[in-house]
Amino acid sequence: MENKDNSSEPLPKKQKLEDVEEPDEVESSVAKKKTPETKLAKECPYLDTINRNVLDFDFEKLCSVSLSRINVYACLVCGKYFQGRGQSTHAYTHSVSEGHHVFLNLQTLRFYCLPDQYEIIDSSLEDIKYVLNPTFEAAAISKLDSQTKLSRAYDGSNYMPGTVGLNNIKANDYCNVIFQALSNVVPIRDYFLNESNYNWMKPPPGDNMFLLVQRFGELVRKLWNPRNFKAHVSPHEMLQAVVLCSKKRFQFTDQGDPVTFLSWFLNALHMALGGTKKRGSSIVYKTFQGRMRMYSRKMPPTELTPEQKRELLSSPEYQEVLEETPFLYLMADLPPPPLFKDELKENIIPQVSLFTILNKFNGREEREYKTYKEEIVKRFELTRLPPYLILCIKRFTKNTFFIEKNPTIVNFPIKSIDLAEYLAPDCAAAAGNTVYDLLTNIVHDGEPGAGKGTYRCHTLHRGTGKWHELQDLHVRDILPQMITLTEAYIQIYALRETTSEAT
């Protein structure tokens, strides 16, 4: 009797397998019995119901009913996401109730017809699969910088791959400009376009930081996708990963500072890719890391007598200390703006040369840095230049009451910026080429304060040689002369490969 009872126990479990759809990678025997044959796509009468205008794979891939991320299917008729494929699942119910029959598994990239439960195999659906997961071969990546043809989206609009607008969900333009700038840095772009460079990495259990690598790779591939259905990309999944990995430090509902975000994002990518303190341990360090010498010495308190100051300056504690340190970006200081108006009672727009603010790194100019208990004088000297130099211009100063913006215009050339004079004399001979060309320029507009105003990005398309201005979804051509009139905040310069390049 006990054996008979035990043999009847699995029956309810078998019933459950019919109601809950299993992942496609391991189909149950019940599912195989329900779908004994696989029909070809030409036998499917519902392919003409697919509406590519509503398909958008940029958003988080979760069921619109249960909010589950497991085994999610996209309805190719209305564009909504549903879980499962078997009977009593949300996708099955949607198919029966709405008459929508063609679905795509967002993980396995396989097409199915519901409720008939057969797989669709048809070459006409490859464009949908490519939009969901763009892939790039090494040969195609090597030709990106020589590409000059516009791509046409499914809605008829033209766009240039690589200079694509990003959707601003609420206040994430400070993230958008960083994503657009980094996606145009050739080593970073080429590394993340080729998914085989990092998809083999297995992060430790419970480590969510590798999600940044996966999402940024997906975003870069979508920005450079030549066969997109629309002429813009939504960074929704990338921003979700930023919020999660930064522990809500960076939000897309509150305006932030792109310099702070850039610093965190580069270091987070470096660590997620298994980077160490060694030079070249990740693509981030290979691309952006340089080195400098920092000389620092303490200043005696002002209330001391001259004799006491001389005594302190002769002590070991007040001697100059040399420290060699790596850097991912340089922070340049602006001179304070004038306090008074001119004779026409109009505000003066102060201007300064780029080379003037770079004198901070010539090894001779000293800067004072005050803390609540001491004052330190420092001077900086570059010892190694990176292939791509990130220059951040300090426009915001915070006092006791508010954040003030320095509106000084920095006059900078677009090409042929030689930084040899900022290298240490003993390092200049081995440096080789020291000439840089501007690649990206990020601008802050509007009210003072890092949490206010808006951000836009100027990028150079290497294939056409044209400059483009990207501000969220808006992309337009811009003359190089207009770039120098903006309030530059972050700039990325590319080291010229040969000194014989045209200027």
Image (cartoon, rainbow, N blue to C red):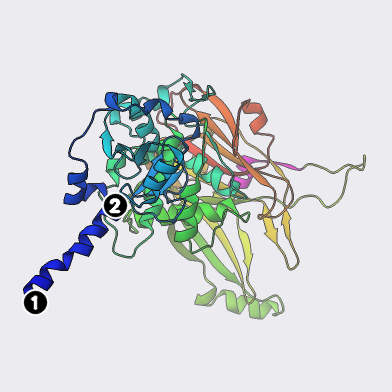
Per the model, the C-alpha gap separating discs 1 and 2 is: 32 Å
The residue indicated by pointer 1 is 2
Q: Is residue 58 magenta?
A: no
The residue indicated by pointer 2 is 21
Task: Depth check: give the residue in front, 305 or 79.
Answer: 79
Q: Is residue 448 above or below residue 499?
A: below
Tag nearer the camera, 1 or 2:
1
Q: Is residue 299 above or below residue 490?
A: below
Mark 2 secondary-structure assignment:
loop
Horizontal and vertical percent position of residue 2 = 8, 77
Residue at 17% over, 65% down: 10
For residue 316, side relative to residue 21 (left or right): right
Which portion, as a residue range, is magenta? Answer: 350-358
Q: Residues within 10 Å of mark 1 (few under 14, many from 20)?
A: few
Identify the mark nearer the N-term, 1 or 2: 1
Q: Is residue 331 above or below residue 204?
A: above
Instruction: Please say whether residue 375 is visible from this viewpoint.
Output: yes
Badge 1 amino acid: Glu
Horizontal and vertical percent position of residue 320 = 51, 67
Mark 1 secondary-structure assignment:
helix
Which image quarter holds the N terminus? bottom left
